[in-house]
Amino acid sequence: MDKLWMYLQLPLVQRALIVSVLIAFCSALLGVTLVLKRYSYIGDGLSHVAFGAMSVAAVVGLTNEMLLVLPVTIICAILLLRTGQNAKLKGDALIAMISVGALAFGYLLMNLFSTSSNLSGDVCTTLFGSTSILTLSVTEVWLCVVLSILVFIGFILLYNKIFCVTFDEQFSRAIGMKVELYHFLIAVMIAVIIVLAMNLVGSLLISALVIFPALSSMRIFKSFRSVTVFAALLSLICTLAGIVIALMYSTPVGSTIVTVDVVGFLICFLIGKTKGGVRA
Amino acid sequence: MAFLTIEKLVLGYESKAILPPLSFQVQRGDYLCIVGENGSGKTTLIRTVLHLQPPISGQIIMGDGLKADEIGYLPQQTLVQRDFPASVTEVVLSGCQGRAGFRPFYLKDEKEKAYHAMERMHITDLGKRCYRELSGGQQQRVLLARALCASGKLLLMDEPVSGLDPKVTCEMYDLIEELHGQGLTVIMISHDIAAALRYASHILHIGTTVHFGTKNEYMNSDIGSNFLKEVGYDG
């Protein structure tokens, strides 16, 4: 306990906590929509794209990686989400293609051009997040705070539209909603969250952050609103617990958080089984 | 001026027409059933009227005070909805989105409208229930209530009774007839020719040949009587 208390006094740890709480919250909000739209894997694909972009940024020597990573990821998110209806390449195949391609490309670039002496360490950090969440600069924290608050506000304002578009796209089009626009906005928000979350759990584990809270929540709750709210809260709790455990036992932050998410899912699954779900 | 005027409308995908040009009119208060074999293009017609897909040529004209976004649409159920966590109230309310524009929240009178629509569908007691746990008939009522929120003038229904058992099918038809009696204009795709002839005022038959007319005209036409014989209707 003393050890934990001591850690909590450190500004680095405080920053990490603020950032992770915000990211966990936002990713779970959007996760519900993604799972329901059958896009669970998009988080994975996008994070690999972000990884590729990050490698390019590192090789080119950009001081602020975000300038490249964020736009590239947003563009890919838009491309992936809009191919739903009439594309020759179906969504899942496209995601798989982009995700593996970007991953390979990123690693190749890092291998060829990296100046770092500890290449595999760098790659491992990007893929699994390791402890980079604890080395955030003040600027990064602010960027993260501002972006996640923007995503949160965006989600609240679009909540009813997102519900309508996700529940029944055909109907939404028929009553004259601008479905494309909302898909576009959802894609942008997802891309932003993915890029932010890479710091927290790394690019391989991001899907977990997006889908586990949503899936857990759907075991227990039965309305869109309650599912969304509970997913966000559960994600927040799991992430905090994960970080605390990681600090106390010096385990890698990303994988610890995901493990806690898995445990959370199992608990929700059991509750859902025994109670047959709560009416809400 | 008719509610809906279809003029020389050619339907199809990628400039390949699937039907001869269609022309027909729907007046306020009509009950039009669209019949025809599977794959004849009934759903394509509805999708084109709703501007969900572009026509190859021809015109869709709304008149008599009907605006393009004032059509209540009851689609065939999609896969996503089957495991979607949503309460009945949430689903019905979402029908009001059409007029909401960029306004993020629902107004009080929209909530009242949704409640009223649920009353008309006799589902107010289901309000807090989860949509996916309802029976097929109840789900259709919920979607119909949502369509009523979108429009109080014209309902477009794609196979509203498919997959329902006979008793529920009957109730569903009665409910639609009730709405029609309250002044709604109804356009319905139907496999059920007996019901179509029982309730509809007009019939549009599409297939290799196309026929549009009142119910009696249809029953006396060659195409109508042949089709009725084919499906074994002896009403």
Image: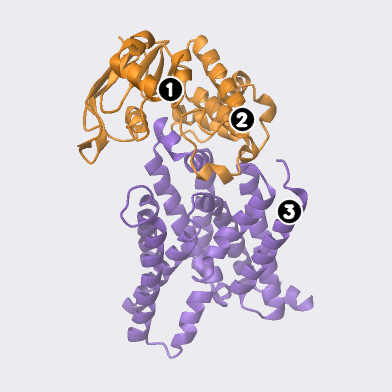
Chain colours: A purple, B orange
In the shown orientation, is residue A127 left or right of residue A256?
A: left
Identify the amino acid type marked 1: Gly
Count of numbered circles in the view: 3
Q: Quadrant of residue B222?
A: top left
Residue positioned 48% across, 41% down in the render: B78
Q: Earlier in the sequence, mark 1 or mark 2?
A: 2
The disc at residue B62 is none
Residue pointed to by mark 2:
B138
Residue pointed to by mark 3:
A273
Identify the amino acid type marked 3: Lys
Dot 2, crowdedness within 10 Å: few (<14), some or many (≥20)? many
Residue at disc 2, secondary structure: helix
Residue positioned 52% across, 70% down in the render: A199
Q: CA distance from mark 1 to mark 3?
A: 48 Å
| Image position, residue A127 (x, y; %) | 49, 75
Of A62 and A183, the residue lying toward us: A183
Dot 3, crowdedness within 10 Å: few (<14), some or many (≥20)? few
Residue pointed to by mark 1:
B232
Of B222 and B213, the residue lying toward us: B222
Identify the amino acid type marked 2: Gln
Residue positioned 60% across, 54% down in the render: A214
Question: CB atoms at circles 1 and 3 under 8 Å apart?
Answer: no
| Image position, residue A162 (x, y; %) | 50, 42
The answer to whether residue B154 is visible is no
Where's the N terminus of chain B, which quadrant?
top left
